[in-house]
Amino acid sequence: MKKLVALIALVGLLVMVVGVTAWQLSSGDDDEPNASMGKPADSEAADSGASSGEARTAPDPDLQTFYDQSIDWQPCGQRECAKLQVPLDYDDPTGSTIELNLLKRPADDQSAKVGNLVVNPGGPGAPGTTYADQADYAFGEPLRARFDIIGFDPRGTGASSPVDCLSDSDLDDYLAEDPSPDTKAEVKTLRSWSLKMGKGCKRLSGDVAAHVSTVEAARDMDVLRAALDEDKLTYFGASYGTKLGATYADLFPERSGRLVLDGAVDVSLSSKELSLGQAAGFQRALTAYVDDCLADDCYLGKTRKEALATIKGFLDEVDGDPIKVGDRDLKIGNAFYGIVVTLYNDEYWPMLDSALGNALDGDGAELLRLADVYASRNASGGYDDNSSEAIWAINCQDDPSYTPVGKIPGTFGEFRKASPTFGDVFAWGMEGCEGYLGPKPAKRKPISATGADPLLVVGTTRDPATPYEWAQALAKQLDSALLVTRDGDGHTGYNMGSDCVDDVIEGYLIDGDVPDGDVDCS
């Protein structure tokens, strides 16, 4: 997910391509694969999910109208855009409908096209259309050449009946508030934002806010698969997109083709376990950054302990005395997000050197800009998407449980052990869904995707947002999964500088080559 919205129980999970490409970043080391490639997953390796004539058969006759749709692609700049109709409520398929926003980035080599690759960048709440539009940054040349890359804004996000919960000015305040309150007044303020978010979502978004779950989004993907006239879905999901993809495979194993789940989420964990995992993950990433800084003349101090203390001390100082930046203030929430966004990729570390170094000298402009990029806030003061609100609505609908504010201090020991720097933030995040006013989800059975074709789960050893242990766990939960390990820093594994990882994924998606076993790209 992209967002670290502190009032959510879970740090945002999104591959940081959207919004960051303007910084002209790239990644760098090369590895060689150390596992042999097996035979194709099926005898029609070059046809991916091509239709055999039954692609449009709906799982429920009442849904057949939706499965019979054909997509009317229209030019939109250098891409093609369209809409897809789906039921608002799958339990009432003859009732209200909503439209999903679609974008296609056509394959560079149409004569050798394999098929359609549906993609999701995570969030939850990030627009998939933006991810597809930025395919030149997000995906390697082999995939861009051989696939029409299809992005869709999941229901409630982007331009697909987006949920709205706060005004832009309120969202500014929400993101700037202290994510780790240390006074009764600050605790009251944090709780009030959760309540305000819940009331706002219900008031401003109506019925849509009650139908933005991951299960519903996965069912939408099957309608999209049918409209693309593909027997089986070919899919690349990053970060939270792995939860969406795993959910799809579990719901529609017979329709699951080549699925890559990169930066995997362990769907079996409780909200507390997820928060503890991310606390440890971001601390690990911050420590890696500090160690890299110490390898040279580090502006933070002479030892790891001293450098980490400098960062913690800076956050504490900004908490009490925000830094003036023009007509805005760099508050503790902004400073937190500005630091954390740079931990998604070690290629972003020079940005943190500059932004945090200047902020320590009293100039918070760069750090505030980084926080704005993370929140999709533009220069005019508006927001380019609704991801900061959608993440709240989707996460809380998937799991509306929360920890009352009075019980959170009792968890500080665990969280501070996981992350001395950020532990309190993740602990307080468990209060986030108190204001949720939507329906409670049905209890789900453990995920397995029994009967699905072989799929790839990708994990990175020092991934801050989706710890490597989550990928290991998800690969075990999914019956047909193989684990691909990238040894490195940053969030997700594909297109992050490892030839080994890239070759395995591209060979699998393009040719159907399934590794003989788990792949270790150390």
Image (spheres, rainbow, N blue to C red):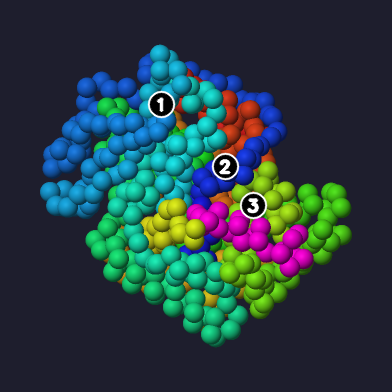
Find residue 21 and name its label: 2
Mark 3 touching mark 1, by CB under 8 A?
no
Dividing the image into 4 quarters, which one contains the C terminus?
top right
Q: Which quarter of the figure has residue 448?
A: top left
Q: Where does residue 451 sit, x and y in percent of width and height?
A: 35, 34
How packed is label 3: few (under 14 Cα within 10 Å), some, or many (20 or more)? many
Q: How far apart are labels 3 and 1 at the CA level?
A: 31 Å
Q: Mark 3 belongs to which amino acid?
A: Thr
Q: Which residue is mark 1?
A: 106
Query: Along the polypeptide, which appears first: circle 2 or circle 1?
Result: 2
457 on left or right of 324? left
Q: Secondary structure at mark 1?
A: loop
Q: Secondary structure at mark 3?
A: helix
Q: Secondary structure at mark 2?
A: helix
Give the residue at the far top of this rendering: 111
The correct choice, above or below, for 520 with respect to 375 in the image is above
Task: Please tell me which residue lies in front, 493 or 415.
Answer: 493
Find residue 515 and name its label: none
Q: How would you classify the magenta stretch by its main secondary structure?
A: helix
Task: Please tell me which residue lies in front, 489 or 442.
Answer: 489
Q: Nearer the viewer, mark 3 or mark 2?
A: 2
352 on left or right of 395? right
Q: Which residues are magenta?
A: 357-379
How packed is label 1: few (under 14 Cα within 10 Å), some, or many (20 or more)? many
Q: Where does residue 140 sit, x and y in percent of width and height?
A: 55, 28
Q: Nearer the viewer, mark 3 or mark 1?
A: 1
Q: Which residue is mark 3?
A: 342
Q: Residue at x 21, y 26 (%)?
A: 54
Task: Please tell me which residue lies in front, 19 or 242.
Answer: 19
Mark 3 touching mark 2, by CB under 8 A?
no
Q: Residue at x 54, y 81 (%)?
A: 186
Q: Mark 1 belongs to which amino acid?
A: Pro
